[in-house]
Image (tube, rainbow, N blue to C red):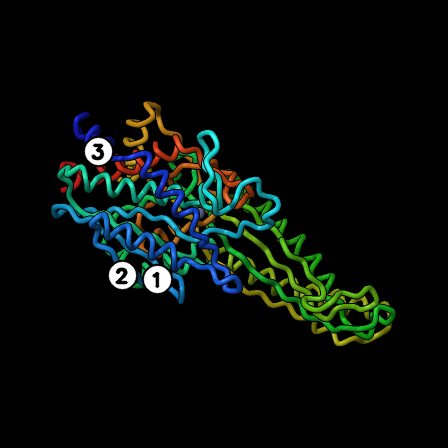
Amino acid sequence: MISDEIITKVLNEIDADELINLTADLVRINSVWDPAAGTNEQEIAEYVFKWAQQQGFEAQMDQAAPGRPNVILTSSFEPGKRTLMFEGHTDVVTPGDLSAWNYDPFGAQIAGRRMYGRGTNDTKGNLAAMLSAMAALKKSGIRLSGKIIGGVLCDEEDQMLGVRDFIQRGHADTITGAIICEPEDGFICITQKGALRARFTITGKMSHGAMPLAGLNPAPAVALLIQRLHKLEQATVKASGRDEFLGWPSFTPTVIQAPASGAPQLNVMPGEAQLLVDIRTIPKQSHPEITRQLKDLTGKIQKQVRRDYEAYDKILTVQRNSDLNLAQEILTDRPCTLTDRSDPIVQAAHWATLQLTGKEPEYAGVPGATDGTFLRSLKNIPIVTLGAGDRFVPHQVDEWVDLDQLIETAKIYALTALHYLYPENNT
Ligand SMILES: [Zn+2]
């Protein structure tokens, strides 16, 4: 049992003004990765590194890529079997068209109880909250066991180089549970959709639009492919059903291009077409199985289109070289994740949320991948995604976060760590 006195002692160390100022400082540093503009995660990493040193944390900076450092903070307590990680990313997506913003995207302006700016919601507010929670626990002097690692990572929005580097260097080896600090509006997210993205390239033969028999049009294969992908989606929906938190799995053709490169012209039959498909998965599906299905589909469609061309040539009494070719490659493979509700990290987040809000916590799922995807899939670390911020606001103009929810989140993070590393829960 953790006494009310201990809880109060920890919560008293969360300073709302410091948290808001820290969030504002982070938002004011433009950390969009944009080599042309010369912005990256270097400056924000240096800021966090300095802050961590001032707070007395053991801190280390690793270059995941040039100009793209990770900062790793460690807080060690008495020996214990658990190591908790708080993960928050430093990069933000581009503000896009500046004239569409009513607020300065890097101004951290406050209006009412909201702070506006790129990253307020995704995820600099939550990054500041996790840092404040770590600092509060340290200042409280409460006896805990085990360790907290703060992973302040680069490049979450693109290739997730930061978390990969973090894992490669062995930082994740002792972690037993992780809180992924992302805008989830206070929901405890225990599952995340997976992503499998593939490119199909269909190669025929280019010709004049007036002389189509001189070439081989890739278009019929593209049409067939789209139909078959939809059939595959229907079969998957039927077999795996709707996930309680993540909804339906999907196979979505997103880019359909012919010619695959160069300018399209109405009187030119393209020699090559490409189709990109964005597949989003739920835990009941298997990525190796889908990969096998896509490969199978490629072979079958190639065979069928060749056969169709040959049959049609007989009718037209022509003889084309019908060796149309279909190739397929997987561009991204990020598996789904699911953490058991009985896992201590989920229990800790549940207890902390209940303490703070006085209400039974609500559970949900994350529609996309996060850095947590890699911690789960490569290191088998149980993860919970949790944080302040409306779930539909990330990447929009006039991005904002509710300051009261942010303060509550810092407290939830601190109590989650308190519960997870409380000596009687962790021996
Ligand atoms: Zn994010």
Within 10 Å of the Cα at label 1, are there few (<14), some (14-19), or many (20+) other Cα atoms?
some
In the picture of the structure, the residue carrying the numbered disc 2 is 170
Q: In percent of the image, x 80 and y 69: which residue is there?
A: 268
Q: Name the kind of residue labelled 2 in the image.
A: Gly
**Residue 315: percent from left, percent from top:** 85, 67
Q: Nearer the viewer, residue 38 or 276?
A: 38
Q: Nearer the viewer, residue 164 or 103?
A: 103
**Marks 2 and 3: CB-CB under 8 Å?**
no
Spatial separation of the CA atoms under disc 3 and disc 1: 32 Å
Q: Earlier in the sequence, mark 3 or mark 1?
A: 3
Within 10 Å of the Cα at label 2, are there few (<14), some (14-19), or many (20+) other Cα atoms?
few
**Residue 366: percent from left, percent from top:** 45, 42
**Marks 3 and 1: CB-CB under 8 Å?**
no
**Marks 1 and 2: CB-CB under 8 Å?**
no
What number is the disc on residue 279? none
The quadrant in which residue 186 appears is top left
**Residue 363: percent from left, percent from top:** 40, 33
The quadrant in which residue 327 appears is bottom right
**Residue 286: percent from left, percent from top:** 45, 52
Which tag is nearer the camera, tag 2 or tag 3? 3
In the picture of the structure, the residue carrying the numbered disc 1 is 165
In this image, 365 relative to 59: left or right?
A: right
Spatial separation of the CA atoms under disc 2 and disc 3: 30 Å
Q: Nearer the viewer, residue 407 or 4?
A: 407
In the picture of the structure, the residue carrying the numbered disc 3 is 10
Q: Earlier in the sequence, mark 1 or mark 2?
A: 1
Residue 377 in the image: above or below residue 36: above
Quarter occupied by the N terminus: top left
Residue 172 in the image: above or below residue 240: below
Q: Name the kind of residue labelled 1 in the image.
A: Asp
The secondary element bearing badge 2 is classed as loop
In this image, 99 relative to 184: left or right?
A: right
